[in-house]
Image (tube, rainbow, N blue to C red):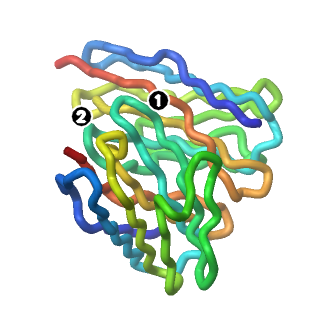
Amino acid sequence: KQEVTQIPAALSVPEGENLVLNCSFTDSAIYNLQWFRQDPGKGLTSLLLIQSSQREQTSGRLNASLDKSSGRSTLYIAASQPGDSATYLCAVGDNYGQNFVFGPGTRLSVLP
Amino acid sequence: SAVISQKPSRDICQRGTSLTIQCQVDSQVTMMFWYRQQPGQSLTLIATANQGSEATYESGFVIDKFPISRPNLTFSTLTVSNMSPEDSSIYLCSARTGLNYEQYFGPGTRLTVT
């Protein structure tokens, strides 16, 4: 059974810092991996989707990498801003793309 | 991509009553799902809403408590039946579309049961 963990659980950084969020999964036979952002009391916003054959995806200040063999993904946020404050979740799609397993999330606070 | 709307956005309900949540997608999608997010927790999949047939429920969730309908490829409803305070959660509708199976979420329905 796939299990997804995220480290750290919470992170507080000053504005302008570059930061890395980590996601680990136990079964490397994945279809894809998706990073989401969730603001308090809101739904999820898709940030980046990485297919199992890809190593990384980039969108603006965000870069997500995937290392299937080690069961890890990282989300890199460059030049963080207070507007980046949110909970970041990673979700791993199984080998058929039918089911997603979510990690517990990393709560990020970027201080002005 | 897919844009998903949900109604209601929030509700306060009394114990023992039922609430139906509607989910509308702006395009036809192959897969629709319902998730629950309890306070301070991550997402838990309730069921996959199947078009034209009974939903597929995850362990711990049953049709009598969470009946789901999906009459077409763009619309689904989730009913939370005979509610108790433990059902207080955010309920999220999601859809997967495209060859990449990218997943999209609605804004959620915040349910409080008193």
Compared with B52, A32 (above or below) is above
Q: Is residue A57 left or right of residue A27?
A: left
Residue A83 has which mark?
2
- Identify the residue at horizontal 76%, vertical 36% (top origin): A1
Q: Residue at x 41, y 36 (%)?
A: A61
Left or right of residue A14: residue B74: right
Q: Residue B35: give x, y in percent of width and height.
A: 47, 52
Give the number of marks: 2
Pointers 2 and 1 in contact (CB under 8 A)? no
Q: Chain of mark 1?
A: A
Quarter of the figure that contains the C terminus of chain B: top left
* Along the line of sight, the residue nearer the viewer: B56 or B29: B56
Given the image, on which type of amino acid does mark 1 rest? Gly
Q: Residues within 10 Å of mark 1 (few under 14, many from 20)?
A: many
Query: At numbered mark 2, what does the secondary structure look like: helix, strand or loop?
Result: helix
Q: Give residue B55's position: percent from left, percent from top.
A: 60, 69
